[in-house]
Image (tube, rainbow, N blue to C red):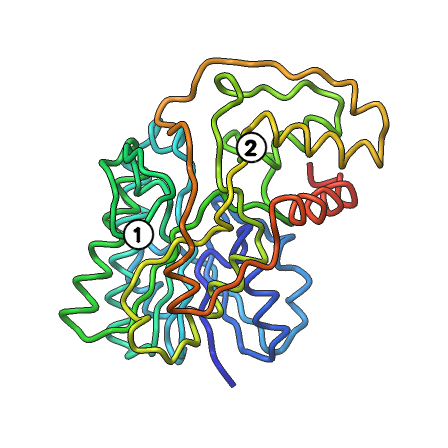
Amino acid sequence: MKKILITGGAGFIGSNLTEYFLSKGCFVRCLDNFSTGYRHNIESFSTNSNFELVEGDIRDLETCQKAVKGMHYVLHQAALGSIPRSINNPITTNEVNVSGFLNLLVAVRDEGIKRLVYAASSSTYGDSENLPKVEEHIGKPLSPYAVSKYVNELYADVFAKTYGMEIIGLRYFNVFGRRQDTQSAYAAAIPLFTKQLIQHQSPVINGTGENSRDFTYIDNVIQMNERALLTENPEALNQVYNTAVGDRTSLNQLITFLKELLTTYDPEIQNIDVKYGPDRLGDIPHSLASVDKAKRLLGYCPSHTIKDGLKEAVKWYWQYQDRL
């Protein structure tokens, strides 16, 4: 039986990974301090004998050491996300994303864990204007959050080379899907827009709405984590991979898609107007990933386009409106 520690396991991505690997018969230990994760995301796993919760903070080395004890693999999802949050509070972002990551690396090294797969970020591309984004060519970070996630990559590379560890980073591109938070002041675009439309409020788009993103459904992210965790290709190890679809959608197109899907549940949603506000500090205008490296070295094949993913996500949010 594979034993996997998932840090941030009560969060959006972490809880989906927890659910998936439990369904595969793995033993899953979840480490979370519930600063951004939710107990309701993992409550259905509590009766599963292969699930264990460790409540704690990655900023504490002893907690990390306790959490990795006896594990074979680690999927590191715990982080303070959001560019605006990092601009408002760069110190805490650094403490969690950099110091916390370093604690985990040390704990993983000392425990002799087989492999660590960690959540990197497309924000690492910074001011690079190249499209599509290719892993080997990045720009300068545009936010404290982006700095923190780039430092993760630097530390991972050093630990892999210095201590002979197996480490893989996944640069997530605008992940969305079931369980993504709508309540936070820093909620991402898709859950926020979906919530506003369901509640007959006008979504507010930052800028003209022509900014575009490579929106990536959660099932594609699960596939990438599994492939990174289990690959036996030595060339694939100690690399960083774009985790995306390889297609981009403007925010105006996104609103159109959401309204079309939600109108099947509530015809009045089609008539809701959209408002436009100023550009958001630290944002980049366009984001599009090349996934060629992931396809070549990990055998990755995205299962969901943005329209496929939005259909599933909207269905989930409509069903669980009590969480909006």
Residue 307 rendering spot, x and y as whole percentages? 66, 44
- Determine the secondary structure under disc 1: loop
- Observer-nearest of 209 and 10: 209
**Is 102 situated left or right of 121 in this image?**
left
Look at 31% across and 38% down and name the residue there.
130
Location of the C terminus by quadrant is: top right
- Using the image, determine if residue 306 lies above or below residue 78: above
- Does label 2 or label 1 sit earlier along the sequence? 1
Q: Quadrant of the rendered structure where residue 173 is?
A: top left
What is the C-alpha distance between the residues marked 2 and 1? 25 Å
- Using the image, determine if residue 154 lies above or below residue 112: above
Residue wearing tag 1: 135
Q: Amino acid at mark 1?
A: Glu
Q: Is residue 15 visible?
A: no
Look at 39% across and 55% down and name the residue there.
119
Residue wearing tag 2: 189
- Observer-nearest of 287 and 157: 287
- Using the image, determine if residue 277 lies above or below residue 313: above
Q: As drawn, which residue projects farthest toward the bottom?
A: 1
Q: Is residue 89 visible?
A: yes
Look at 51% across and 57% down and name the residue there.
221
Q: Nearer the viewer, mark 2 or mark 1?
A: 1
Q: Amino acid at mark 2?
A: Ala
- Using the image, determine if residue 315 lies above or below residue 164: above
Residue 44 rendering spot, x and y as whole percentages? 69, 63
